[in-house]
Image: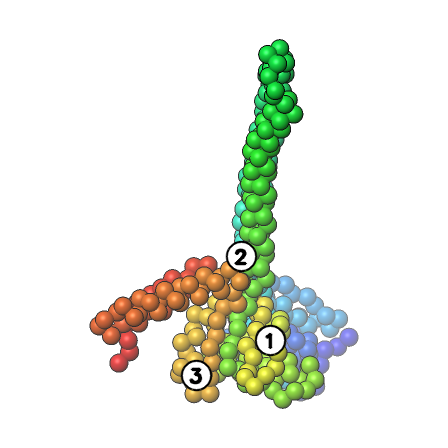
Amino acid sequence: MANNCKKCTSEVKSNHNGIACDLCSKWYHAKCVGITAEPYKFLKSCSVEESNDDNGAQSNVNGGVMWFCQDCMGPASQTIKKFSVVQKRQDEMEAQLRQNAKQMNMIELELKENKREVENQITDNKREITEIQKQILDINAQLQMVQEDVTMNNENVKWSDIVSQAVETKFETVSADINMVEKTLEETRVKAQEIRDKENRRNNIILYNVPESQPGSYEAVIKHDSDYFLDLCDKVFALDIAREDVKRVYRIGRRGPEARPLLIQLSSGMLKNNIMETTFKLQKVEDFKHLVITHDMTKLEREQCKKLVAEAKAQETQETSGEFIFRVRGPPGAMKIVKLKKRK
């Protein structure tokens, strides 16, 4: 089947300098599209494979070098740009998955260690209970001897009272050991729950003072809050966050006269970290300087944060020079009090 030049409509033969678009596969004479001898020679030198069509004209398959006709240049550029964005997001997701796998391995190792400690404690308690049972048998034998002596001496001593007192003493010891095991198991359960709660909140941030939409459908309310957040990321943080990167949008609490906190769950911890590391930029944009952005903390982390805030306030009241302030900084689980010089 003949290949005709899309520009001049005449046939592209094997002895012509012909070139095919890598997107639409249409053929052109090199001179018809303004490709001179040197660029054409370069394109041909990059060819990793040549094939002849039915008329003997050669197709160009270039190793890493592609040529697009004028009609396809725009769509090709858009396709390459979109592919670059997809590739970047894929790399970020793979990095996040590796980080998640590492964290899960650490959690699994910690749970195994806790399980091993509990099992060792149970084994020790079983061993101690067996020893106590042996001691009780020995005491029973000794008491039997005492009973016989008392009977012989006609003393008014009750055998049942002696046995009851001895058994009660040993039972209290066993009960204390069992309570210790139960306490250890409960501590392990609470610790595992805290780890799971941290993992569920790892990609979350909370925004305060975000205006609420008028009451309406669920979809309209979610769209309002999502649009506000995406606008914030674009104008303040200059982050290229797509709508699909926002996995969850949720208002905390019941609607009232004041705007409720807005919880945002992102697709990766990398996006969250980019936002939390640049929250200082809020003060530079008038429309968003009233916002406050925090981590989504567990109950235990919130309690620790409150204690640190109270301690920071106490230190600030003791600072007599008036030149410094004390603030709590750092991610959940690693927060600390820092001393900062007041801005003039």
Q: Picture coordinates of residue 170 (x, y %)?
A: 58, 30
Q: Quadrant of the N terminus?
A: bottom right
Disc 1 crowd rating (10 Å Cα; few below 14, some 14-19, many 20+) is: few
Residue that lies at the very extreme toward the right in this rendered image: 1
Q: Nearer the viewer, mark 1 or mark 2?
A: 1
Q: Picture coordinates of residue 136 (x, y %)?
A: 61, 23
Question: Does the image show residue 337?
Answer: yes
- Name the residue rendered at 47%, 80% in the picture: 291
282 shown above or below 87: below
Q: Which residue is mark 2?
A: 99
Q: Nearer the viewer, mark 1 or mark 3?
A: 1
Which secondary structure lies at badge 3? Answer: loop
Of 277 and 312, the residue lying toward us: 312
Q: Picture coordinates of residue 289 (x, y %)?
A: 43, 83
Q: Which residue is mark 1?
A: 253
Spatial distance from mark 1 to mark 3, Cα to Cα? 23 Å
Spatial distance from mark 1 to mark 2, Cα to Cα? 32 Å
Q: Quadrant of residue 331?
A: bottom left
The tag earlier along the polypeptide, 2 or 3, is 2
Kind of residue at badge 2: Gln
Q: Which residue is mark 3?
A: 289
Question: Does the image show residue 65?
Answer: no
Kind of residue at badge 1: Gly
Q: Are marks 2 and 3 in contact (CB under 8 Å)?
A: no
Which label number is shown at residue 276?
none
The tag earlier along the polypeptide, 1 or 2, is 2
Q: Are marks 1 and 2 in contact (CB under 8 Å)?
A: no
Q: Are marks 1 and 3 in contact (CB under 8 Å)?
A: no
The tag earlier along the polypeptide, 1 or 3, is 1
